[in-house]
Image: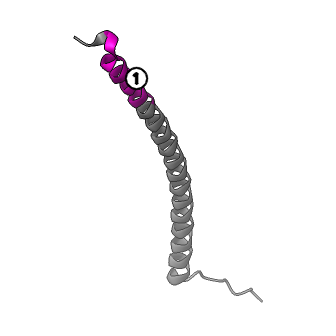
Amino acid sequence: MVAPTMAISPLSLDGQRTSQRLRAVEEAEEMLCSQLGELEAEAVDQARAYHAQIKSLMHQLSQAQLLLQSPKYRL
């Protein structure tokens, strides 16, 4: 007696392909989310650095204005 062969139906193949594509999409989404998180952290660091630089420049400008307003520099 010959064992019956199991034929894979086209629907089953489609389901497997869809499942593989879904896994690939989910992995890509995870990678993108990770990259986005890294970019957001970098952007926050840059914003903090720029803010500190602006504060420093404002302080320098304030000191320069005080110096120019002092009697020593008045005309």
Residue farthest along the bottom direction in this orientation:
1
Read off the residue under disc 1: 63
Q: Mark 1 packing: few (<14 Cα in 10 Å), some, or many (20+)?
A: few
Q: Quadrant of the C terminus?
A: top left
The residue nearer to you, when weighing 37 against 16, is: 37
Residue extending farthest to the front is 71
Left or right? Give the position of 66 relative to 48. left
Residue at (33, 23) in percent of width and height:
65
Please tell me whether residue 26 is drawn above or below residue 7 in the rendered image.
Answer: above
Q: What residue type is labelled 1?
A: Gln
Q: What are the residue bounds of the magenta stretch?
A: 56-72
How many marks do you count on the picture?
1
- Above or below 59: residue 8: below
Which residue is the extreme one toward the right?
1
- Magenta-highlighted stretch: main secondary structure? helix
| Residue at image coords 52%, 71% | 17
Quarter-wise, where is residue 5 in the image? bottom right
Residue lying at 36% horizontally and 17% vertically, measured from the top left: 67
Quick one: SS at disc 1?
helix
* Position of 32 relative to 60 (above/below): below
Q: Residue 35, image x and y in percent? A: 52, 49
Q: Image check: 5 left or right of 73?
A: right
Q: Which of 2 and 45 is in front in this view?
A: 45
Q: From the top left corner, tell me how far across and down residue 32 is, in percent.
A: 50, 55
Tell me which colouring the rendered structure shows: one colour
Residue 51's place in the image compared with 22, above or below, is above
> On the picture, is 57 further left or further right than 34?
left
Could you tell me residue 50's position as x and y percent?
44, 35
Q: Work out whether residue 40 or residue 33 is closer to the camera in this orientation and state it.
A: 40
